[in-house]
Amino acid sequence: MATAFISHPVCLRHEMGEGHPERPERLVAVEAGVADAGLESRLARAEAPAASREQLLRVHDAAYVDALEKLAPAHGLVQLDPDTAMNPYTLPAALRAAGAGVLGTDLVIAGASESAFCSVRPPGHHAERARAMGFCFFNNVAVAAAHALERHGLERIAIVDFDVHHGNGTEDIFRDDPRVLMVSTFQHPFYPGSGVEGRSERMVNVPLPAGAGSEELRAAVTQEWLPALERFEPEMLFVSAGFDGHRDDAMAMLRLVESDYAWVTERVRTVAERFARGRIVSMLEGGYHLPALARSAAAHLEQLSR
């Protein structure tokens, strides 16, 4: 069964200014990685719909959604914080990025695809319930997970986040929801400076020091993630797939390589096969060195689509 590969052309039109690392070429790099690895035959392509207001309000405050709609410019840029800005295509792109996860969830739960990868931008895991930050506007993975819970009636969802930055927005949204387990690794101390104080049985955040690489990641997954996932027995898994922990990525100081992303994906897939009928939806988050992003996303997809 093919893996759904979900994207939308408007995601290439969102830009936040010259020289910004979160740029349209990131999606071009993912496509290049797919082509170079010969993965096209394993993928079923689909166009992302726009997320509905109802779907967004499961995880975001209505006043926040209204504010983003009012801030959306007709031309030029509107700066929300030093790192995060909107151009005329940002809101449509953000709606499609969130909608991609919803479509992926529907396809996987219906059995039309065993897994889905959403090659979209802007990313989402820093977006809190009522705050845009860190290049993120809507929390794409949270919208997808909430859709599985509320629309499809699942009772236990796990979110796996291996971006180099802590998914503070995802934690903000699901911290008090007993139906959701989040396991994550991230560089610390580092932006956004969160993830350490909120550790619990359902928020299994594992900070890694600058310079950490394969050994430290694999120990975190083996010793902390996997026992937590096995205890929780999730009915579906969602992935915030950030590839900015790669050693070539100047955005951070971890030392991961493509084989690490393949390994962690294989571990997640094993959990999904054991407890969740293999059901996984993965959302693209970070990754800013384009050749490393291409290779890492391909390694992730190769394991996801087995």
Image (tube, helix red, strand yellow):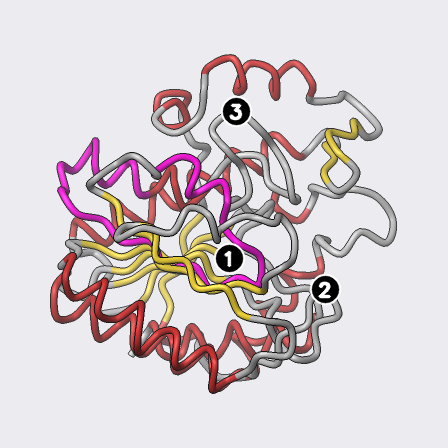
**Residue 90: which numbered mark, if any?**
none
Q: CA distance from mark 1 to mark 2?
A: 16 Å
Provide the residue designation for mark 3. 130
Q: Nearer the viewer, mark 1 or mark 3?
A: 3
Q: Which mark is residue 284?
A: 1
Residue at x 38% of width, y 51% of height: 199
Q: Disc 2 residue type?
A: Met
The answer to whether mark 1 and mark 2 are in CB contact below 8 A is no
**Is 3 on the left-hand or right-hand side of 6?**
left
Task: Decide: is 10 above or below 189.
Answer: above
Q: Is residue 157 magenta?
A: yes
- Circle 1 sits in a helix, a strand or a loop, which is it? strand
Look at the image and give the residue range highlighted in magenta. 145-174
Mark sitting on residue 251: 2
What residue is drawn where x is 59% and y is 71%? 209
Contact check, label 2 and label 3, Cβ < 8 Å: no
Image location of residue 39, percent across then percent down: 44, 78
At label 2, counting other C-alpha atoms closer than 10 Å, the crowd grade (few under 14, some 14-19, many 20 or more) is some
Q: Amino acid at mark 1?
A: Leu
Q: Write the residue at 41% across / 58% down.
A: 205
Query: Which residue lies most toward the front here?
Result: 197
Q: Is residue 184 magenta?
A: no
State whether residue 107 is above or below residue 142: below
